[in-house]
Amino acid sequence: MKIGTLEIQGHAVLAPMAGATDRAFRTMCVDHGAALVTTEMVSAKGLCYGDRKSRELLMLDERERPAAIQLFGDDPDIMAKAASLVMEFSPAAIDINMGCPAPKIAGNSCGSALMRSPELCRRIVEAMVKEVDVPVTAKIRKGYDKTQVNAVEVAQAVEAGGASAITVHGRTRDQMYAPPVDREIIKAVKRAVSIPVIGNGDILDANDAATMFEDTDCDLVAVGRGALGAPWIFTQIEAYLTHGVILPVPPVSRRMELLYKQVRAMAEYKGEKIALLQARKHAGWYMRGIDGASAWRQRACELTTIADLETLCVDVIRAGERG
């Protein structure tokens, strides 16, 4: 399928997640079959004001392409200027965050707060489309809250603004990530627009992806939390949807190998100190479901060096072999 001029090979893409989908993790997901990855959300205002951290989030590795950059903001002119600026990094597409429920984002009229004004959503997309020659997409939610379930209206506004695709997370802002995702609203959006619709929410394994396709008729699925500590989920989804094959979760030894590889990559561009601080949560995700996971996660919270990580990974593997 195509998102504008961008050809997508595969069924599943990596959803952007703040504090998680950094360059190293995105590359891991591409290595395991993610059809498209997207950066953590970047402040359009911060980028326009020359914020160094914002620029660092935009760095793309050649090994992770095709990759999109996600921006957040509420001013059409600033969003358009930011879209122009990020072209320096040669993204395959630019995504607009219209779904983040975090108070520090939505509370500043950005993210999911944009859904309260479909017309503003349209103007933001329109302004950005005029500035760049890559596809502009948007990620929305079911609605702002239970009194304003307007994903269909916002999707139509975004399409009218010139968006090439839209991702729909089937929960409202106030639902955050707790209740089961509403696939009916994703299906309703799919019926209401002609651009590709990407279904998002509660995709934790290959069967969840298949069910999302069946229940919503969506064009792609976006995997978020299901990929954390499990980049192989994309391989599993492709195997199941293409060949009907259910691939097992990798053994503990392989999982620790991937964790170590990912953190080493993080350290190369973030520095060992920052990488190991951030690695603690990634280690916890990779250790889900293994024997003694709670104790291993506690040890992971004390990681300070690559050597510490190597020792931990070896100990986890040896414990698994004894078990």
Image (tube, rainbow, N blue to C red):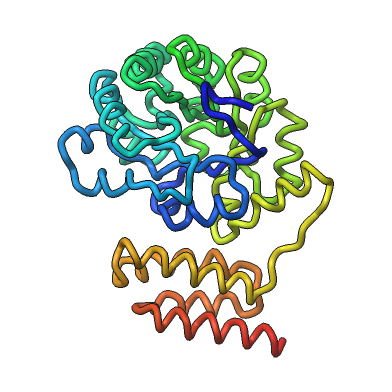
From this viewpoint, which residue is outermost toward the right? 244
The picture places residue 272, in percent across and down from the top left corner, at 31, 71
Residue 209 vs residue 284: left or right? right
Residue 189 falls in image quadrant: top right
Residue 255 vs residue 66: left or right? right
From what the image shows, is residue 169 above or below residue 156?
A: below
Residue 134 vs residue 204: left or right? left
What residue do we see at 52% from left, 23% from top? 5
Q: Quadrant of the C terminus?
A: bottom right
What residue do we see at 43% from left, 22% from top? 115
Residue 138 vs residue 80: left or right? right
From this viewpoint, which residue is outermost toward the left? 49
The picture places residue 192, in percent across and down from the top left corner, at 62, 13
What residue do we see at 31% from left, 19% from top? 131
The picture places residue 258, in percent across and down from the top left corner, at 55, 68
Residue 50 appears anywhere in the view: yes
Residue 121 falls in image quadrant: top left
Q: Quadrant of the N terminus?
A: top right
From what the image shows, is residue 10 above or below residue 135?
A: below
What residue do we see at 73% from left, 33% from top? 213
The picture places residue 218, in percent across and down from the top left corner, at 67, 27
Q: How many marks?
A: 0
Of residues 52 and 114, the one drawn nearer to the viewer in this rendering: 52
Residue 146 appears anywhere in the view: no
From what the image shows, is residue 130 above or below residue 271?
A: above
